[in-house]
Amino acid sequence: MQISKRVQELPPSGIRAFFDLVLGMKDVISLGVGEPDFVTPWHIREKAISSLEQGSTSYTSNKGMPELRQAISKHLNAKYKLDYDFEEEILITVGVSEALDLAMRAILNPGDKVLVPEPYYVAYTAVVHLAGGVAVTIPTSPKNKFKITAQDIQKAYSKDVKAILLGYPSNPSGGSYTKQELLALAAMAKKLDIIIISDELYDELTYDYNHTPLPTLPGMKDRIIYLNGFSKVYAMTGFRIGWVCGPADVVAAMTKIHQYTMLCASITGQIAAREAINNGFKEVQRMKMEYDRRRKFIVEQLNEIGLSCHMPEGAFYAFPSIKTTGETAMDFAKNLLNEQKVALVPGVAFGRSCEGYVRISYASSLENLKEAIARMKIYLAKSRGKG
Amino acid sequence: MDEILEILSKDARRTPQEISKLCGKSPESVKKAIKEYEDGGIILQYKTVINKELLNGGRNSVRALIEVGIMPQKDLGFDSIAERIYNFPEVKSCYLVSGGYDLLVVVEGDSIQMVAEFVASKLSPMPNVRQTATHFLLKTYKEEGQIFKKSIKHKRLNISP
């Protein structure tokens, strides 16, 4: 069959073959998983089960159940003093993945450019391309913990740039932004008059300071498409529930696409999500504390075995340098997998400037982390011996 | 609860070195804190939760919850009677409770006969023990926060973006 030009043009994911290699292998200790190792807290699963028992199996309104949108609006107000009208300014999506796609399709005209700082989540450049836009990636420096600066934005800007897509805390680098840093980025976006699509899926998993959502910054709310969801923070990846907040016109445009392509997010997922946002606080704190301990453990251990690693500020990823091995990130990942059966993701999956780095997910039990470190140590000793 | 206690309460095998890495403290300060908890009687014991139902097919292990009604002694209250009861090695736990009876006693033995014998010959005849009601445990679902059922574990994909 003749495949559309646009899809053919999608750069083949260099990482796909590596992923297939990992998936085909048995007894692997994996630090390559981009989802929590916790199961969804029981009170949330229990709510989903009873909703099925009661026969809640229908469609919901396109925008999502009003009760869930109201709960999100209330939560954002209580936590961040954000004021989003649940009728006009909030849309429930099938994960943030769908929200990203909708945002791009809603705002881009053919040829419009979107700035995407590296390292970026694997879908970012693809959704821009699929919506007819052009992704302009911006390399960032490990010296600045892979964070983008206002100057970086200015340098990459040209008149076709319509938006910037920012994800923080970051998958894969674990880097995030303080309020001070965000103020500088926001001021530049305002000056250049570009939209910010802000993916804040890991917001609650910020460890060393309080997370600041971009729309809370003065004068920014109308310039931001704010994306968030339940997958990571509440350990609900399989429920596939995300949300968008933004100006009514953008949310209406996104809803238009959503109603024809998705109709609505699953009702079971939405009911579970409502329980999560209303009563999940304690469980979130429990999981966050556990991630935080592993974060300190893994970073210390990585540095000890000679893989220099900065302390990530959020999410559940460490992003160490493997440059001392002299291998490319892909070779390192493949060899480590074949020789020691430890899986991780080469940094190049997240942008070309991330060569020499690997993503390690610490959403894994402490026992696994310990074993993986022991195996990596053996691998490093051997490869240094060879060198 | 203090972070060190919380970590140990979940897994008593964690070493001070590991704990120090997990909470970003020095190994010395963790050792010192543990020593203080031990000396202060806050940490009493380090134990293993064993599923005895799986051990020897569940043979040689019977437990019973016994409700014990007490006639309190003048000037002595419940404590001295409780002490006479909990000093028996067969008694694994002993609680003073509110409600229709006074002490809740957990007794363990190799067989039903042994537990029954303990109740009949040691517990019931004790002065001031008014009455007992013995409930043999048939199945343990959860103990000390640990679910005993072996569940089929759903596995995540080994790698995902």
Image (cartoon, rainbow, N blue to C red):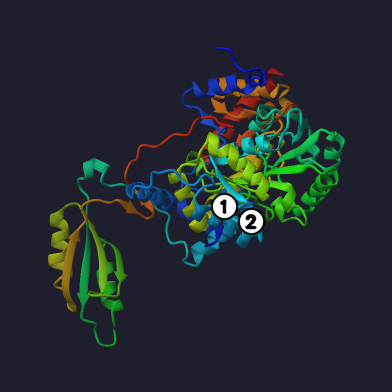
Q: Secondary structure at mark 1?
A: helix
In this rendering, would A213 be left or right of A263? right
Label 1 CA crowd tier, 10 Å (few <14, some 14–19, many 20+): some
In this rendering, would A63 be left or right of B101? right
Q: Secondary structure at mark 2?
A: loop
Q: Quadrant of the N terminus of chain A?
A: top right
In x, y percent, where is residue A269? 46, 45
| Residue at image point 34% right, 47% down | A55
| Residue at image point 59% right, 37% down | A257
Amino acid type shown at disc 1: Met
Q: Which residue is mark 2?
A: A84
In this rendering, would A269 be left or right of A355? left
In x, y percent, where is residue A326? 73, 22
| Residue at image point 17% right, 67% down | B133
Q: Could one spot residue A281 in this view of the protein?
A: yes
Amino acid type shown at disc 2: Tyr
Image mark 1: chain: A
Estimate the spatial distance between the alpha carbons at disc 2 and disc 1, rounded to whole Å: 29 Å
Q: Which residue is mark 1?
A: A289
Q: Could one spot residue A177 in this view of the protein?
A: no
| Residue at image point 12% right, 66% down | B120
**Which one is nearer the viewer's eye here, A308 or A33?**
A33
Callout 2 touching callout 1 (CB < 8 Å):
no
In x, y percent, where is residue A325? 71, 24
In the orientation shown, which residue stands out farthest toward the top? A1
- Respond whether the residues carrying marks 2 and 1 are from the same subunit: yes
The correct choice, above or below, for A55 with respect to A119 in the image is below
